[in-house]
Image: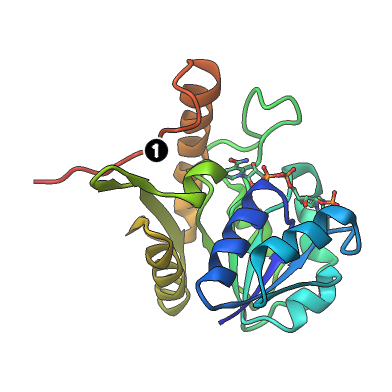
Amino acid sequence: MKIGIIGSGGVGGTLGTRWAEGGHSVTFSSRRPDSPEMTELVAKAGPNAKAAPVTEAVANSEVVLLATPWPTTLSAVSAAGSMEGKVLIDATNPLLPDFSALEFGTTTSGGEQVAARAPGASVVKAFNTVGFNVMADPAFGERRASLFYCGDDPKAKQVVHQLAEELGFDPHDAGSLTQARTLEPFAFLWISLALVQGYGREMAFDLIRR
Ligand SMILES: NC(=O)c1ccc[n+]([C@@H]2O[C@H](COP(=O)([O-])OP(=O)(O)OC[C@H]3O[C@@H](n4cnc5c(N)ncnc54)[C@H](OP(=O)(O)O)[C@@H]3O)[C@@H](O)[C@H]2O)c1
């Protein structure tokens, strides 16, 4: 697939590199597509990867990954050009700048705010509940990290399910996009355990069933 990345840091850089290594055609973008960091990232990601300005990365892609810090996210979406007909994967978390809490509670979510600024796009909230180090390698011995996603378009969710499975995740459909109201606080639980409670970043959630 043709995948455009808006925000090529820890999350965008890791997912984009893995998808490029897996054979997808990946265009990384940031506000500085010509920066030395972007040149290094493209070289590391290999021949299926390139860098471009945001609007070009979006226009040339079927799937767009949004991986920007929350304070710049909504303006980044508005400046990205039309995303009509595209699958827009929202990996962001609406964290306050000091990371102490989320900007939204239970009546809306970052995912819904993103969707409101991307008319015609099929928004799927995904990859926000695991650290970028887990995206690099979702295997924990015999077990795989669970990856929860939500959205309103079944076909778009199938695309995301496949992209997550290719990376080695155990993906689970959590329901409609309003479930971003639970997936974003769920990500905050990961952040609290990993970075405040001392579990460290090498952890992920695994769904057990019987
Ligand atoms: N870190 C994690 O483990 C993790 C896990 C799950 C979800 N998340 C969420 O994912 C998002 C990204 O996190 P991250 O850790 O990958 O951040 P990061 O390492 O700081 O990378 C952010 C990237 O976004 C780019 N950027 C910033 N503003 C932009 C704009 N307006 N337009 C285009 N690109 C822009 C930055 O490059 P320039 O400054 O050069 O533009 C940079 O490449 C956040 O919302 C975070 O909460 C993070």
Residue 70 seen from this side? yes
Quick one: quadrant of the N terminus?
A: bottom right
The residue that label 1 is drawn on is: 204
At mark 1, the secondary structure is loop
Q: Which residue is situated farthest in the left direction here?
A: 210
Would you identify the image quadrant in which residue 208 lies? Answer: top left
Is the residue 70 above or below the residue 155 in the image? above
Would you identify the image quadrant in which residue 157 lies? Answer: bottom left
Residue 110 position, x and y percent, is 63, 49
Q: Amino acid at mark 1?
A: Ala
Q: Which residue is situated farthest in the top direction here?
A: 197
How many neighbours does mark 1 have within 10 angstroms: few (below 14), some (14-19), or many (20 or more)?
some
Decide which of 192, 170 is in the foreground and name it.
Answer: 170
> Left or right: where does residue 88 sit relative to residue 184?
right
> Left or right: where does residue 114 sit relative to residue 50?
left
Beta carbon at label 1 within 8 Å of ligand 1: no
Residue 77 position, x and y percent, is 77, 63
Residue 107 seen from this side? no
The residue shown at (70%, 69%) is 118
Colour option used: rainbow
Is the residue 150 above or below the residue 159 in the image? above
Residue 178 position, x and y percent, is 48, 54
Decide which of 181, 52 is in the foreground and name it.
Answer: 52
> Left or right: where does residue 58 sit relative to residue 142?
right
The residue shown at (51%, 52%) is 127
> Left or right: where does residue 185 sit relative to residue 63?
left
Is the residue 7 above or below the residue 206 in the image? below
The residue shown at (62%, 50%) is 11
The residue shown at (74%, 56%) is 7
Residue 40 position, x and y percent, is 78, 58
